[in-house]
Image (cartoon, grey):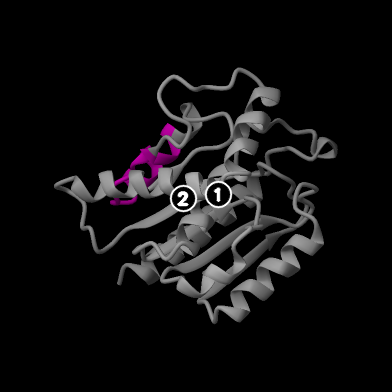
């Protein structure tokens, strides 16, 4: 299950689904925003994603609805599902896992790490992998510390990998090359994070 960036489903998410399929998995991109809602620019995307960040229960419900649909597919093993997401989608992936959803793993690529319900992480069933740009200005150190303490308190099975010289959206070639803006592609971090995800999936789907 793949969750989109803050602009909604587009060519980037479809490319990731094709790469997942090439690995032998079924890739299903879920639409958290809903039919016809496609922000035209970063300003609209920020507003749309902020709505769900402020309404975490709705975020969880939309993600769960996508999970329910995936389980209906005849070529999917309902007992062997993981969720992965990019930026906004990384936040959604972690939030779905925190809800206690019956999934094997959750992967966040450069997503936000905060939640208004840290006490509910005790319900966590999934293993967690966070792939994070070490220079990402959108995730303050206090948020990272809170997330790590949240995982420890829940006695979660979790990993967090930092990529040097990488900022927000490091896995998306469409993010450009201006790291000083806080949003930029990093080819090395992209390749390394994909390999980390592959290793994680091999582990959880044994």
For marks 1 and 2, give the CA distance.
Answer: 6 Å
- Between 65 and 2, the one nearer to me in the picture: 65
| Residue 152 x/y as whole percent | 62, 79
Crowd around label 1: few <14 · some 14–19 · many ≥20 (10 Å): some
Looking at the rendered structure, which numbered label has been put on residue 60? 2
Outermost residue on the right side: it is 180
Residue at 80% of width from left, 63% of height from top?
A: 142
Outermost residue on the left side: it is 74
* Highlighted range, magenta: 14-29
| Residue 15 x/y as whole percent | 44, 34
To which quarter of the image does residue 123 belong? bottom left
Looking at the rendered structure, which numbered label has been put on residue 56? 1
- Between 143 and 50, the one nearer to me in the picture: 50
Looking at the rendered structure, which numbered label has been put on residue 179? none
Relative to 55, residue 195 above or below: below
Considering the numbered disc 1 on the image, is that residue within a helix, a strand or a loop?
A: helix
| Residue 148 x/y as whole percent | 67, 71
Considering the numbered disc 2 on the image, is that residue within a helix, a strand or a loop?
A: helix
Q: Is residue 109 left or right of residue 9?
A: right
Crowd around label 2: few <14 · some 14–19 · many ≥20 (10 Å): many
To which quarter of the image does residue 184 belong? top right
Residue at 65% of width from left, 23% of height from top?
A: 44
């Amino acid at each position: 299950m793949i969750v989109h960036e803050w602009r909604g489903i587009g060519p980037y998410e479809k490319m990731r689904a094709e790469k997942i399929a090439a690995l032998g998995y079924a890739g299903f991109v879920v639409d958290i925003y809903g039919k016809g809602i496609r922000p035209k620019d970063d300003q609209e995307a920020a507003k749309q994603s902020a709505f769900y960040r402020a309404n975490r229960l709705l975020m969880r419900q939309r993600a769960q609805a996508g999970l329910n649909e995936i389980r209906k597919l005849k070529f999917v093993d309902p007992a062997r599902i993981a969720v992965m997401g990019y930026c906004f989608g990384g936040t959604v992936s972690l939030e779905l896992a925190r809800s206690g959803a019956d999934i094997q793993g959750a992967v966040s690529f450069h997503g936000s790490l905060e939640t208004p319900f840290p006490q509910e992480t005790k319900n966590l069933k999934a293993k967690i992998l966070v792939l994070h740009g070490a220079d990402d200005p959108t995730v303050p150190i206090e948020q990272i510390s809170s997330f790590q303490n949240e995982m420890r308190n829940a006695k979660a099975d979790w990993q967090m990998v930092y990529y040097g010289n990488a900022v927000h959206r490091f896995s998306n070639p469409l993010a450009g090359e201006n790291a000083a803006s806080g949003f930029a592609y990093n080819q090395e971090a992209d390749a390394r994070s994909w390999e980390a995800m592959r290793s994680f999936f091999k582990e959880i789907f044994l």
